[in-house]
Image (cartoon, rainbow, N blue to C red):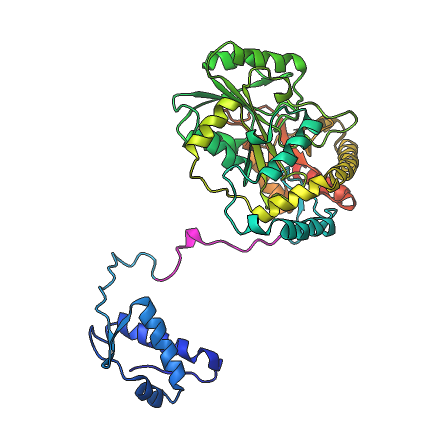
Amino acid sequence: MFILIDKQRNMNFIYQQIYEGIKDNILKGRLKANEKLPSKRSLAEQLNVSINSVSFGYEQLLAEGYIYTIERKGYFVENITEILQRGNLFKDKLPEDLKEDPVNRDGWLSLSHMASDISFFPFKEWMKCQERAVQSYKRELSEIAYSQGPYEVRDTICHMIALTRGVNCEPEQIVLGAGTQLLVGQLMELISKDSVIAVENPGYSRFYQTLKKMNFAVHPVSLDDHGIKMAEIKATKANVVFVTPSHQFPTGKIMPISRRIELLNWTAEGDNRYIVEDDYDSEFKYETDNIPSLQSLDRNHRVIYMGTFSKTLLPGLRISYMVLPPDLLREYREYYANFMQYSNSLILFTLHYFIEGGEYARHVKKMNHLYERRRKLLIADLRRRFQDEIKIEDVPAGLHFLAHFQTEKSYREIEERALQLKLEIYSMRRFMLKKNVNKENSISLVLGFANLKEENITEVVERLYFVFH
């Protein structure tokens, strides 16, 4: 039978060795189609193992279709078609260009705009809410959630964003999803394919690339001091505009009421015009109260509001949502009638209790104070070290700010030097959607501070100084 049994291995897995041995012989052609296999007793004696081990091995082979049985005659090899292989492309190994190296972050410091600090996250309170969700929603957790997400969770979010962001909606208008990028993809399936899309430039490249891959005509539109330029939007003949009015990404500009009204009036002046408002980090506003959402001013149901919990909770939880106007909600329900909700129901119900019990509001308030302090310390240290060589766009909001550095070095040189010094940075050229950044003797960086410990701020600034000098 060409089977070798290694009895030094766990005795519970002898049947697996029998199974693997016979399967290997069948696939390599040593055992031919319709060839009779030894009886269970006979093979057990040959291999000096128990009959049960042989029986379990045979049953697994039978279940997978490698052998068949004839009553009172025994077990036989199934007639299996040979697997065709065109060439030897992989040579049983993954090609080198597809391999991944383990990420080693030892010694690294980060100024990433995407990170958040989880060291102050109230895990105990979160786990209590999760335990409560398990006890209260056992039936719902045993079923596939409604395509828009559980109603109770949408109702809780609806009340929260009405209070904190001024969003006018009903729970029925909210669609939950595992990330804003996924929701944008779902939304754009409802939009006519001949639509023209305008996006902020500089802006969020993931949205830009998503829209282009969906074969939309996408036009990057430049900014002025008030945000996206209305004249350029009109020149593109766009009917859908993506904006980040409460904290423009990545420049940090806050869109004033005058430009917001211009945008809203633009939607009223034409048919099928929409604004997609990405409110990605609006929970963090320093020195003054939060800026109300653009959607709160909408009187014609033309704003699609996008929100996320990635900045305030844990990015890995992947909880985002969008608020659809009634006409698009009707289309969504028809188009996604058979859609299955991607988000984890247990996490959603946990979030429901986390918000309802006030833990979410307390956590956001605490992190606002923490992030405001870090932001001020980082800006002060940067100005002290770089002096006249730096200009900071000091907008008291969000989890990052834009800084311009005087230097004769290129973006590539700066990025390579940061890599050598184990400093994670993101330069402006990452966010320019159409034109390269060629401002003479100046480099712009988007500096995130959310996951920057106060005791590391001086070291971060020193590394950054040596990146430029």
Q: Which residues are magenta?
A: 92-105
* Spot occupied by residue 371 in the image (x, y as percentages of width and height): 75, 37
**Toward which corner of the image does residue 264 lie, by quadrant?**
top right
**Which of the image's four quarters has the C terminus?**
top right
Residue 116: in sight, yes or no? no
Occupied quadrant, residue 335: top left
Q: Nearer the viewer, residue 421 or 424?
A: 424
> Residue at image x 43%, y 31%?
334
Q: Residue 94 appears in which quarter of the rendering?
A: bottom left
In the image, residue 214 above or below residue 66:
above
* Residue 275 sits above or below residue 50 on the image: above
Which residue is at a point 40% across and 81% down the rendered structure image? 53
Residue 291's spot in the image, x, y percent?
A: 70, 23
Q: Quadrant of the N terminus?
A: bottom left
What x and y, as percent, mark residue 187? 48, 30
Q: Is residue 94 highlighted in magenta?
A: yes
Query: Is residue 174 visible to the viewer in this orientation of the structure?
Result: yes
> How far across and how far down the image is residue 134, in percent?
63, 52
Nearer to the camera, 36 or 72: 72
Which residue is painted at 41% across and 26% down in the image?
Answer: 216
Q: Residue at x 68, y 50 (%)?
A: 132
Q: Residue furthest top?
A: 269
Question: Is 90 rendered above or below residue 334?
Answer: below
Q: How many marks?
A: 0
Q: Is residue 17 left or right of residue 396?
A: left
- 166 drawn magenta: no
Predominant secondary structure, magenta span: loop
* Residue 298 versus residue 433 in the image, above or below: above
Residue 447 horizontal side relative to residue 375, left or right = left
Q: 200 or 263, which is in the foreground?
A: 263
Left or right of 297 on screen, residue 379: right
